[in-house]
Amino acid sequence: MAEAVPVRCPACLRENGYTAPVFPCACGSPVHPPLDLAAPPIPLTHRTWSDTWVSVRCTTCGRESEWPHPELGCGACGTVVLIPVHPPEAPGTPAGPTGTPAAAAGPDRGSAAGAGAGRAGGPPGGPLGGHPAHIPPPPTAPVPRPAFRPVTIRTARDAVATAALYLRWLGFRDVRQPDGRPIPAATVDLRAPGLVAQVDPTTAPAGLRAVECVWLNGLTASATSVYFALAGYTEDARARADDLGIPLFVMDLTGMPQPVNDPADALVGPDA
């Protein structure tokens, strides 16, 4: 998770801590918007669709995608501000630690000239450290997860507990369940740092409005949104989730959640 940074409210001048949300790219790598902390935050007085999205490029695969625009509500006066983001750099130009292009601090190893400057001798554009200059070395193989142990679902409480266990298995810490017994006819929220999840233990497929609600809850909390359902999803709900990048999971009575769209596959990763 990215580190918290101070953001000063333009209305009351109070500093608020903000942590940029981390999203799963289609390649499985974590992506977070490169905040432009040198630019002042912009008060959000009228929300439009274009304000809601920002283009972010994955530094691993170079894929450019639309993600929720970082925003923050001031804890003192309630003003909501949009936090400026650096525009995506061209593929092959990795971002530096402050969001500026790495080429500004030294030669670009993704170009022929930068590759030649990075070593003595050898033709420009040749291999660097055993790998072509424009291709990063393969990442270190992750440690495989242990197999998930499902819990048989007999009640709405079992469904909520299974979703919480699965989220912990995915690596989310401090997953909080609501107090009291879940109501069978209602969805239940689960929260963790950087995560907003909704569990639908009903026997009707989750619809478009349910997916949009969990997305808005995640947007408000600057967190990843995830949805679990026992009865699956309507076609328009699945299409909307794909547009918004919401991971969808369906749970059978054996208690084994299954990803049903690409964002869910990316969240689970290749070692599930």
Image (cartoon, rainbow, N blue to C red):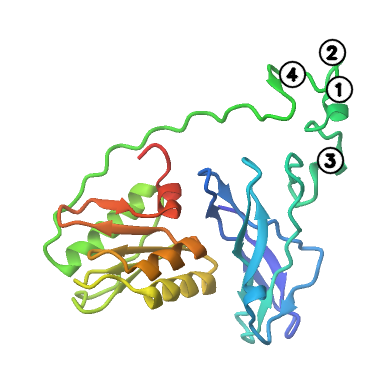
Labels 1 and 2: the sequence-earlier one: 1
How far apart marks 3 and 1 lie (CA) works out to: 14 Å
Amino acid type at image mark 2: Gly
Residue drawn at the location 62% of the way across and 76% of the way down? 49
Give the percent coordinates (x, y) of residue 7.
70, 70
| Quarter of image, res 195 | bottom left
Labels 1 and 4: the sequence-earlier one: 1
User: Tag 4: Cα neighbours inside 10 Å, few (<14), some, or many (≥20)?
Assistant: some
SS label for mark 3: helix
**Mark 2 and mark 1 in contact (Cβ < 8 Å)?**
yes
How far apart marks 2 and 4 lie (CA) works out to: 9 Å
How far apart marks 3 and 4 lie (CA) works out to: 19 Å
Labels 3 and 4: the sequence-earlier one: 3
Amino acid type at image mark 3: Ala
Of circles 3 and 2, the one toward us is 2
Image side of residue 257 versus residue 196, left or right: left
Q: Which residue is mark 3?
A: 103
User: Tag 2: Cα neighbours inside 10 Å, few (<14), some, or many (≥20)?
Assistant: few
How far apart marks 3 and 2 lie (CA) works out to: 21 Å
Give the percent coordinates (x, y) of residue 272.
35, 40
Taking the image as drawn, is residue 123 in sight? yes
Front residue (pair 86, 79):
86
SS label for mark 1: helix
Residue drawn at the location 80% of the way across and 42% of the way down? 102
Residue drawn at the location 68% of the way across and 16% of the way down? 130
Q: Which residue is mark 1?
A: 116
| Quarter of image, res 203 | bottom left
**Count of numbered labels shown in the rendering:** 4
Q: Which of the labelled discs sits on residue 122, or is there none?
A: 2
